[in-house]
Amino acid sequence: MRDKWRNLKKSKQQPVSFDGRTPADIDNYEYACNNIVVFEKIFSEYVNAVTHQGRKLKPSINNKITKEDVTPDLAFEQKNGKYRAVNEIKAWLPNDRSRWMEVVEQLQSYDDELTNWKFSGSEKHDIMITLDPQFTNEFFDYIEKLKEKGITIDRNFSIIESSRQERAEPRIFVKKDHGIINHDKLEKEFRRGIPIIMYNIVRDLDKLKFYDANPPVIYTMMQMWDHVFSKFINSREKQIRLDTGKIVPIDLEVDKIYEKLSKLTHDSNPDCIEKGWIRNALNEFVGLGMAEPSVTSSSKFTIKYRKHSGDTREFLIKLMKKKEEAKPKPSKDGLDQYIKKEDSKKN
Amino acid sequence: MVKNNEYKFWMFDHEYDNQKNLFDHISRLVSQTNIKLNVMLLSSQKNPVDYFTDWKPSNFEMKINPKDHHAITTIKLERKGHESIKVLLVKHEEIPSIYYAISDCKAEEFKEVFTKFVSKYFPDISKVFLTNNEIYLILSKLEKKDHKIMIESAIGKKRLEGKKKESIIRYTDKPYKEVFSEIGQGDQWVQSVRYRADIGVDENGKNISAFKGTITRECYFAIRSNFGILIHEIIPHALKLASVRNRHLKISSESASKSKPEPVVIKFETDLFVDIKKNELYLESIATMPSCSISKYHNNPYVHASLVDYKDGSSYDLWVLTQNRLIIIPRFEASMASMSRLVNHLFERIGEGQVEKFEEIKATTS
């Protein structure tokens, strides 16, 4: 059972466009993936802590928010149990401020004697939230105001900014903007700011393409198109057909795709991908006429794989728009009748 | 001098079962007849003949001389609308994955019949690629053998922004250094050069040439008069130059199924990625590789894209995270042939560089 903030996690991935198909939508997802890698590196190097992505932690009976397991994006713990922290990563906060309370509640749900850590220890864990720099001060002000209403986060809590820096070697720069980290070394380093050269962590960045939040469906489709479907062409004839621009049918089961994509997750959470994400992506392909569901099994599909040139996202979006344009639109007469009907209801 | 038409099938009627004796025999015949030979290097883990007998592409007919030794095989190849040709396939004695394909047919027929035929067997059989610099180094090695190397013609292509390119054919009679300097200044890649090796001048002041030949980027060689120098000097040098790159590609290709595959790094000679506004154009150039598509994830301030090679299903992630390096990370499966094809394309369309092992770097700016 996933915690109630999964919906917020999911919805945050589609902030920039209505349909979640823009490069910015994909970028938001990558922001979280990249930060998982960055924080793992920092916590491993600076305090020799182990990182868990999406670990289910159990609340105590005193938890103010939930009785169900909570799954912070990241949980860190030293093997000797002397230091622990959880970190929630958000590339984006909703424009609607009232929804920020959902984020605060999520953080409050971590403000508890959580159990089910991997290593035993009695130290209280720190709580962190990592945000794009544009949100850190506003979110701090929001939290401060809540204190007046008696809504607080009582454990050591810090707001970290994370941004990509344009340099000769691009970096991800993380810095503590507000709050306290209950570890001298981490407090000092985060206060100063930690630049991580992306080049040096590229193998980890490259591996982590999914975490336990629903990616934009087009992102999943792109990953499947490039890295999965192409691996199921199993004869020279089919390969030549594909190369010469013909459609090559590929029979695939959701499980086979799941098996491949699961390798593109954090080592601590290889099962984070939901088969529903894969089904959604496959159904999109079906809608575009690029796949057919099996009549015998809901988990089997035939992909009509074919070569295209250029950019896959643009190629898919073009097909999506074509499909949308082909949908019958309500006629003007129909709209007039609808308005009349609504008016008569009111009257 | 013996006329070559007296030697119909002369190259293929030998009874030699070892490479040295066969090549000595061919050398003698070539010097006697002054015939031009086509030689192409193929990379293949199994004997290409095994692939040819397992499966045949449509529009081609292929017969094998049943009496042949396995390491030395003659194939007769027919393609609709073309003359039939004979090709001698000889396994390299020291590098087991390299095969020589040798034929006395016309260069055009070799290209249209044999090259097209073997391309159907990608990635099991693939070509070996050379860079501008490597072709230059081969010619400079010939110069050290007391030859004056002159370029009679050169075919190159100019790198233009995005999808555009421009073919440039030079008919010249200039020393190779001068021609390559012009090519380098013009930001071009060499497709092929036709060279002449002079050994002096006669009493009338005319150049006396020892041999003539052609070298292409795809390790196709044509040679007249001196087969020995091709086999003993040019090809070993070409293979040596390509081997460093191929070693890195092999390691990376073999690691594709691992959780964190070994990246291949191309370090370019200049800081190509200083201007991040050009990243989009570089991605467009990359996407011009035949039979591929890319997915762009990020292009400012760094580049992240994935690429699928429809020729064999290999796929990669590409990253630009410094001003002079491009990282290729294979994903799940990637053949060495595909990696080599991709690297060659990047050399052609982006710029030439060194293929290196991935190693962490230090920041150059604060």
Image: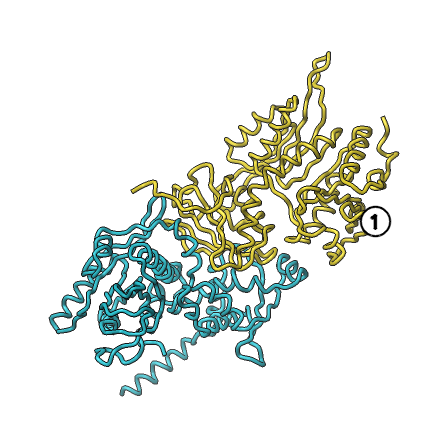
Chain colours: A cyan, B yellow
Q: Quadrant of the C terminus of chain A?
A: bottom left
Type of amino acid at the residue the image marks with label 1: Asn
The quadrant in which residue A339 appears is bottom left
Query: Which of the pair B286/B250 is nearer the observer?
Result: B250
Tell me if A224 is positioned left or right of B92 in this view.
left
* Residue at 70%, 46% in the rendered image: B115
* x and y, in percent, of residue A26 in the image: 39, 61
Query: Which of the pair B103/A241 is nearer the observer?
Result: B103
* Residue at 18%, 63% in the rendered image: A140
* Residue at 34%, 40% in the rendered image: B364
Mark 1 falls on what kind of element?
A: loop
Residue A89 in view, yes or no: no
In the image, residue B109 above or below residue B293: above
Query: Which of the pair B215/A68 is nearer the observer?
Result: A68
Q: Read off the chain for label 1.
A: B
Residue A78 in view, yes or no: yes
> Which residue has dot 1 on it?
B65
In the image, residue B126 above or below residue B186: below
Q: Quadrant of the N terminus of chain A?
A: bottom left
In the image, residue B360 above or below residue A44: above
